[in-house]
Amino acid sequence: MAKKQNLSDTELIKHPKAAKWKVGVVTAEWNPEITSKLKEGCISHLKNEGVIEDNIISIDVPGTFEIPVAAKMLLQKYPGMNAIIGIGCVIKGETSHNEYINHSVATGMTQIGLVSGKPCIFGVLTPNDMQQAIDRSGGSHGNKGIEAAATAIKMIAIEESLNKKKTTIGF
């Protein structure tokens, strides 16, 4: 079976409660030609799913390394936040700098998600070169910002389904 190359063709869920959801989008300013396209795809998909634009809190940070701290800040500022999406792009260079950044951000987002109980989505590209980044920010491999938004939507829906209050018949 051939591996699917473009995972951005996601089915819209259109959750009926999406209009009430609040989603934070933290975008790194480093590699803006890539991250701006990821952010655009992410926000567009959230709106297509029914999240109201006013409920999408978007902030930009200097680089990918700053995403987890900004995610924590958003969760503190907006306690009703349903999910945070971190968007960045760290292209491999001549040193192993990218590995340290990517690992730190993934670990940070995981920790914030576990501590807060809110989905913290890792929407960070980790390509070997600029062409791979282009391919994944609207090129031949789709837009990973869309995939990050779709993941957030699914995780919010899972949380809501698990937190549904059970109805009883009086005893």
Image (cartoon, rainbow, N blue to C red):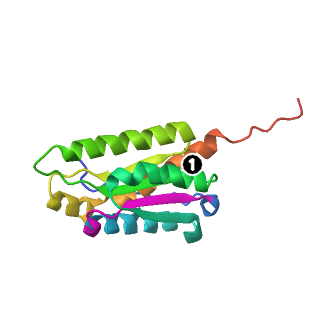
Is residue 2 in sight in this rendering? no
Q: Quadrant of residue 165?
A: top right
Percent of width and height locating residue 120: 47, 47
Badge 1, how many Cα within 10 Å: few under 14, some, many 20+? some
Name the amino acid type tagged 1.
Ala
Quadrant of the snapshot with the C terminus: top right
Q: Residue furthest top?
A: 171
Could you tell me if residue 19 is visible in this image? Answer: yes
- Give the left or right position of residue 104, taking residue 90 as reference: right
Out of 97 and 149, give the one closest to the viewer: 97
Under circle 1, the secondary element is helix
Relative to 115, residue 68 above or below: below
The residue indicated by pointer 1 is 157
Q: Is residue 11 above or below residue 107?
A: below
Q: Is residue 138 left or right of residue 55?
A: left
* Bounds of the magenta segment: 21-33
Q: Residue 28 or 54: which is nearer the viewer?
A: 28
- Considering only vertical position in the picture, is 137 above or below 170? below
- Horizontal relation, residue 89 to residue 107: left or right: left
Residue at 43% x, 39% y: name it: 110
In percent of width and height, residue 23 lies at: 53, 58
Q: Nearer the viewer, residue 143 or 37?
A: 37
Give the quadrant of residue 89: bottom left
What residue is drawn where x is 44% and y is 57%?
149
- Return the x and y of residue 50 as percentages of the image width and height: 56, 65
